[in-house]
Image (cartoon, rainbow, N blue to C red):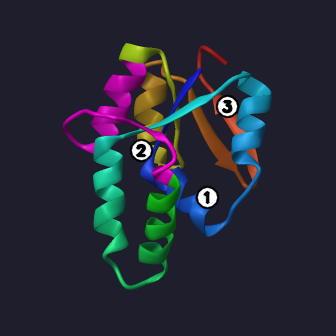
């Protein structure tokens, strides 16, 4: 199953690694992780900051180099939503506003509740 990663989850995993990705594979089977280009652009912008978020964004960018990139246009949240709908993908995010938008459109979501994976949506 295709899982699209949002900026928030990438930064969170860079700041505090967890078993999120292992749990995701355990629950969903074979998982293909991908990052839309607008998410990469957000990470680049955030990495310019000289604070903990900037450092985490740099780590997230380094990790992102090992993943598939999906070329698309627009704002990161819009791109995630459109790609998830068109490809039947799950979106991994911690962004509550994005989660609400995804849920309204019946797009499956993977998020963290504390340190534990939480799956929400119709395909899960």
Residue shown at 31% from the left, 63% from the top? 44
Instruction: Tell whether label 3 touches label 1 (CB within 8 Å).
Output: no
Q: Secondary structure at mark 1?
A: helix
Q: Which percent across, then down, holds residue 110?
A: 61, 36
Q: Is residue 43 left or right of residue 107?
A: left
Mark nearest the camera among 1 and 2 is: 1
User: Quadrant where the N terminus lies?
Assistant: top right
Spatial CA span between label 1 and label 2:
19 Å
Q: Secondary structure at mark 2?
A: helix
Q: Quadrant of residue 73?
A: top left
The tag on residue 120 is: none
Outermost residue toward the front in this view = 66
In the image, residue 92 lies in the stretch drawn in magenta: no
Spatial CA span between label 1 and label 3:
17 Å
> Label 1 belongs to which residue?
13
Work out whether residue 82 or residue 122 is closer to the camera in this orientation and state it.
82
Q: Quadrant of residue 29?
A: top right
Mark nearest the camera among 1 and 3 is: 1
Q: Is residue 124 left or right of residue 50?
A: right
Spatial CA span between label 3 and label 2:
16 Å
Of the numbered discs 1 and 3, the one sitting upstream in the chain is 1
Outermost residue toward the bottom in this view = 50
> Label 2 belongs to which residue?
97
Q: Which percent across, then down, holds residue 71?
A: 28, 33
Over which residues does the magenta segment extend? 64-85
Q: Secondary structure at mark 3?
A: strand
The tag on residue 119 is: 3
């Amino acid at each position: 199953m295709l899982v699209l990663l949002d900026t928030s989850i990438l930064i969170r995993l860079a700041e505090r690694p967890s078993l999120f990705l292992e749990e995701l594979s355990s629950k969903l089977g074979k998982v293909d992780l991908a990052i839309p280009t607008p998410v990469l652009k957000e990470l680049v912008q955030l990495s310019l900051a000289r604070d903990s978020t900037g450092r985490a964004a740099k780590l997230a960018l380094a990790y992102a180099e090992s993943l598939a990139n999906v070329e698309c246009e627009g704002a990161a949240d819009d791109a995630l939503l459109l790609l998830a709908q068109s490809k039947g993908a799950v979106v991994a995010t911690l962004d509550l506003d994005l989660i609400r938008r995804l849920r309204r459109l019946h797009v499956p979501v993977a998020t963290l509740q504390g340190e534990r994976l939480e799956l929400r949506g119709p395909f899960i």
